[in-house]
Image: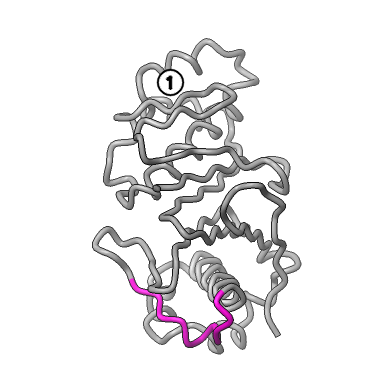
Amino acid sequence: MHPDFTVLPTDLPATFVLADTAGAAALARTEEAISAVLTEQEQNYAKEFDAEAALTWAAGRVVLRHVLGSVLDQDPAEIEIRLDSAGKPRIDEGEFSVTRARRLVLIAVAEDPVGVDLEAVPDHAVAAEALTLLHPQEREELESLAEADLPEAFVRVWARKEAFLKALSTGLARDPGMDYIGSGETPQSPHPDVDIHDLVEGVPAGYRAAIAFNR
């Protein structure tokens, strides 16, 4: 048995899988599922967090292994997932990116290096405080919005940034305020080799997602 997940419809060159580890994919949170596919190292890593965070991380890794197993036609427990120098998980057989938001897990599998990010829309106070992390022009754009529109607009920009930085394999080691991506309808990539797209179809209400391809 494996946890249920949903393949999202898309015209982009990637496979997108969404799983709710508190819902249809709750099997991923069981000790049986975790011990069946996670390595001893992965299980020990999860134990570094508090109990709920550990379970959420482990469930996400269970889903990831089953998704990769399905795509690669391999035993999920036998897939070798390693960390690169930036701490990004990788496999030799292809490119993937994984993101977690609360108990949702979103995974992208592609031929090109890829970054995906899923974010829950925050409270206004959280979004307003986090504006300092953005590019000055992005801050100016968001500060001009009505108060009620800020949280969703902010998280759309932030998901784009995280996806972009993951595609570069830098993550947040690169200052997210360095690059302008913008808050408009279409993301503007600051790198000639990276394409950024918003993900809309299949993304639950209250969340925003984006993907970036490093070609």
Image x and y of residue 134, in percent: 38, 27
Tell me which colouring the rendered structure shows.
one colour
Q: Per the image, is 81 magenta? A: yes
* The quadrant where residue 178 appears: top left
The quarter holding residue 16 reads bottom right
Q: Kindly give the residue lying farthest to the left in the view shown.
A: 85
Percent of width and height locating residue 181: 43, 28
Q: Position of residue 180 (x, y in %)?
A: 38, 25
Q: Is residue 59 shown left or right of residue 177?
A: right
Snapshot quadrant of residue 147 = top right
Looking at the image, residue 33 sits to the left or right of residue 192; the answer is right
Viewer-side residue, 36 vs 112 = 112
Magenta span contains residue 188:
no
The boundaries of the magenta stretch are 72-82
Apparent side of residue 39 relative to residue 63 in the rendered image (left or right) = left
State the residue at coordinates (66%, 63%).
Answer: 19
Q: Where is residue 126 drawn, in percent x and y?
A: 50, 32
The vertical placement of 193 against 38, above or below, is above
Residue occupying the point 63% across, 21% down: 149
Q: Residue at x 42, y 67 (%)?
A: 49
Residue type at numbered disc 1? Glu
Please give the residue where the numbered disc 1 appears in the rendered image.
138
Front residue of 2 and 29: 2
Tell me: residue 138, above or below residue 95: above
Quadrant for the N terminus, please.
bottom right
Q: Secondary structure at mark 1?
A: helix
